[in-house]
Amino acid sequence: MNIMSLPLSEQAILLFAGMVLFTSFSLLAQPRIVAAIRMFAWQGVLLSIVTVMVAVDTGLHHLYISALLTLLMKAIFIPWLLHRLVHKMEFQREQDILHHPVLVLLAGGVLVIFCYSIALPIERLGNSVTQPIIALSMAMVMLAMLMLITRHKAVSQVIAFMAMENGLFFAAVSATHGMPMVVELGIAFDVFVAAIIFGVFFFHIKDSFDSLDVDHLSSLSESDQ
Amino acid sequence: MLDLIDFKGWLLVIIQTWMFVFLAPLLVGWLTWLKCHLQNRRAPSLLQPYRNLWRLFHKDVLLPKHASLIFRMNPYIVAGVMLIAASIIPLFVVRMPSSATADVIVLVGFFALAKFFQSLAAMDIGTAFGGMGASREMTVSALAEPAMLMSVFTLAMVAHSTNLSTVVETLIQHGLVLRPSLLFAFAGLVLVAIAETGRIPVDNPSTHLELTMIHEAMVLEYSGRMLALIEWSSMTKLMIYGVLICNVFFPWGIALHHDFYSMFIGFIAIASKLMLLGVFLVVAETVLAKMRLFRVPIFLSLAFTLSLLGLLSYIILEVGS
Amino acid sequence: MMVVYFLVGTPLFGALLLGIVGHKKEGARINLLLSFLTMISSLYLVYLISQQQILGNDSSDFYIDSLNVYLLALTAVVGFTTAFFSGPYMLHEAKVRKLSDARMRLYHSSYQGFIFTMLLGLSTNNLGVLWVSLEGATLTTVLLVSLYRTPSSIEAAWKYFILCGVGIAQALFGTVLVYFAAAKVIPNVEDSLLWTQLFAHAGELNPVIITIAFVFLLVGYGTKVGLVPLHNWLPDAHSEGPTPMSAVLSGLLLNVALYALIRIKMITDLALEGEQTVHIQNLAGYLMMGFGLISFTVAVLFLHRQRDIKRLFSYSSIEHMGLMTFAFGLGTPLSTFAGLLHMLVHGLTKSAIFISVGHAAQIAGTQSIEKIRGLIQTQPKVGWGLLIGTVVIAGFPPFGIFTSEFLLLSSTVHTYPWLAIPLLMGLSIAFAGLFKHIQPMCFGNKPENQQPVKATMWPVFLHLIIVLWLGLAIPEQLSQWFNNVTILITGSGVL
């Protein structure tokens, strides 16, 4: 299915999907924590825009609710919470220095290709416009995992964690036009609770280690000291 | 089939190339004018770059003592390369006979050639600034060229051709298609253009601050008509990038046929597109601060990532299986 | 159906209630009472299932069959006995570690919340809800791991949160893919995540998608099972959290994650039945065998070098989960039967051991193996409990673990004789590793001024007696269920 054979509204879905992937990449490379939070919020906004567009395109009403949930959770509540915590702990100017940013970005590119090759057989089965997005959503999950392992600050790890949730949501929207409502509500609730617990953890980590650097969290391991 | 002795066509090529070259200082004048107005300064006339060039052409050339042939040849080589490069870019009309001679990858090669000689010449005279500028220029271009190539490949894949004329024509025929790939390629190419033409935030064309300058450091030893040629070439380069971005990503208005009316429309179109692009560029330059030299690789890796994303999203999102 | 609602609703109500009054003196008692109610309703459920085999229909939200009913009962029973143990234990901990009221509230509320997520996950028919409840299990326990607020407990909790969160995210991706495949063949799209529907239409599901989905689900739920190399969170979380939580984590949570894997494997096997080669048909089984065997081997080797008693037994949990995963991966009727039995006896034994370990650590005032000495001299009940528990978990006859391991070994010898060698070697290495540590802890002279503590040991002996009973004779009804499940999973029974 070539993009030129699609109506403009569906082309726009793909365009915004591409932009969502771009936000994943910029999260990957963004060392400044406040900027990363903002970028994460934009990812949430773009996600809910895509969801609304898919809802309009397919006429599935429950997707409007999903879009609203995403907007409230991912674009407003979680960024707000993180912002507040960062300000409270006076971490505004904190940076999460990325070693070898170019290498990480390249690895991200390789991951996208990898996900594409995995998702190819899945895409072949569908004929919906959102089918190609499955590869993107898988890539978002992988990129978030890459971000998780390349970061050293608890805040950016949480952002990565939530970006991974975004990828999963994107997968659900693109592959199956959302999950059954009860599951979707359950997931949203889990994410909500997880965000709050993460917030609690910041304070614990700050109190115990006097910084949010997770490199300090390395006393439990099987290696001999 | 294109007639090789297509007089009208070749005439158009010549007109277009000379317009490129002679309008380039006007574009720079327009940028300066805009910038001054935006910053509440008194603006010089739009024609000020011409006057500068004129003045430089009438000055004597002072050559450094140890300057070799390369140093003396360099301005002519650079100017010549830019002239050829200008001849293959469709300014206001497509289907020119010259487009068969070189495609967009050769264009990248032309720029590399010019930079190669520029850097050689900068090192030739053996001053500290020359060597420093050359090494910085090479660092930037080593990172910028892959990004530009990626972006160009994306274009080529979308249009199934590397020929600029064909690319522009195909994109017009496709009509309005919201392509994520072109969005990314556009963003990537803009970043590359900023780096390659030495604009803020990568380089500042209007200062000679030794800590940060890249392009200016290489041409410090030139004077008179040689300096004029080099300045003029870099103006042309800016123009080439501007026209490339405008015409490839927003091709509407360019003349598809060689008749006067559509060419006139094409001219108006490209002129207004360039003016608009100038506004965006100047606003961005006013808002942004020049970045530290060590951040430039990150800036360019962003450009590369964008271009790569363009390529990937073309394959993933647009072709379909 | 009412009984299921009651079963799942009781701990949910308990979590909310104890969130308000959990710090009071009655908190522990309310916790116990609620767990008792849960246990009673689970036993009633067992009775119902023994009458009518299946509760729920193809499109109901809850579905109880022979596979999950005994796990539900196990969860409720262990939840109750552990609650009994947790009362005096946490009182002692609260005194020693100066836990505030808020943290006691958190503890009791999370305990019930955790039981709720386990029961919900086991009884639901919806794979999506199963995911939600397993994620919920992480969320309810993560703050328990860091209950003591020591730097190492916070580290453990953070690792637990991040690793399990990332792992379980993969499982959600797999679930989305399953839904994607199912939505194409199941008439009512809203029902496409119901396990009964998926099972009924499994043959029509697209094999490629299901294969990819299975890999994601295996990685995801495998993290929760504690399969190597995704096991790092498990020893940390077990060793740093309060002991009642270690008991329910090892005894219950790992089982529920494995249960999820079994359900998925049943669908995958049917979906891949039509493939050409045997290798692809058994793909899910091979993957599980591989992961299981690696987990078993690695855990067995790590047993030897542990210095912390709770870490020691958490590695033992990884070892046994690996064994069960291997058993289900092998997929013969006998090995499946063995795996089902092993889930039950391991859950009982491991929670019993953790209860003894908790007391042992309280007696010695530390979890360090080197400093726990002369338990039998100090407090014979605890010492013997720990010793017998270890004997059971090491697989001595005539206990139930011996039975299940024996069944597994003989079925391995039938299908892949050469795989029996690493299994046997591993079991003996594990045996040596456990007793190397346990022997000086139980026997030997007691250190100066080591005092007995108030211990609740009857849950330990109750669990061990049940395991002994299961080793000597499996009740008719239970073996009938195991046989039913075996038929459901492999197509033929063993009885």
Image (cartoon, coloured by chain):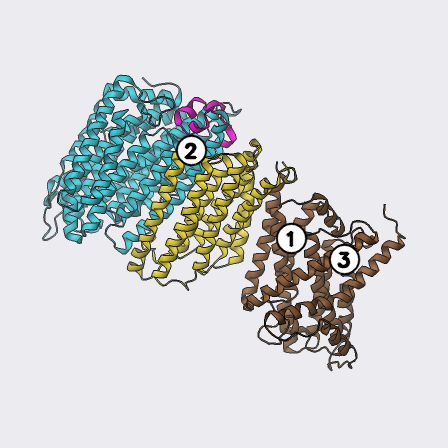
Q: Which residue lies under the disc numbered 3?
A: B267
Image coordinates for residue B253, horizontal then vertical, percent: 73, 52
* Earlier residue among tags 1 and 3: 1
Mark 1, other Cα within 10 Å: few <14 / some 14–19 / many ≥20: many
- Tell me how far mark 2 sits from mark 1, CA to CA: 41 Å
Amino acid type for the residue under numbered disc 3: Phe
Secondary structure under the numbered disc 3 in the rendered image? helix
Cβ–Cβ under 8 Å for marks 2 and 1: no
Q: Mark 1 belongs to which subunit?
A: B
Magenta stretch, main secondary structure class: helix
Which residue is identified by label 2? A180
Q: Nearer the viewer, residue A83 or C282?
A: A83
Residue at horizontal 57 percent and vertical 62 percent from the top: B297
| Magenta span includes C225 | no
Residue at (47% x, 50% y) in the render:
A146
> Whole-percent x and y of residue B66?
73, 80
Colour displayed for chain A in the image of the structure: yellow
Which chain is displayed in brown in the rendered image? B
Can you tell which chain is drawn cyan? C
Residue at 37% over, 41% down = C223
Question: Amino acid under label 1?
Answer: Ser
Q: Position of residue B238 (x, y in %)?
A: 69, 64
Magenta span of residues: C186-209
In-image side of A100 versus C487 (left or right): right
Location of residue C42 by image quarter? top left
- Crowding near pointer 3: few (<14 within 10 Å), some, many (20+)? some
User: Mark 1 — residue?
Assistant: B151
SS at mark 1 in the image: helix
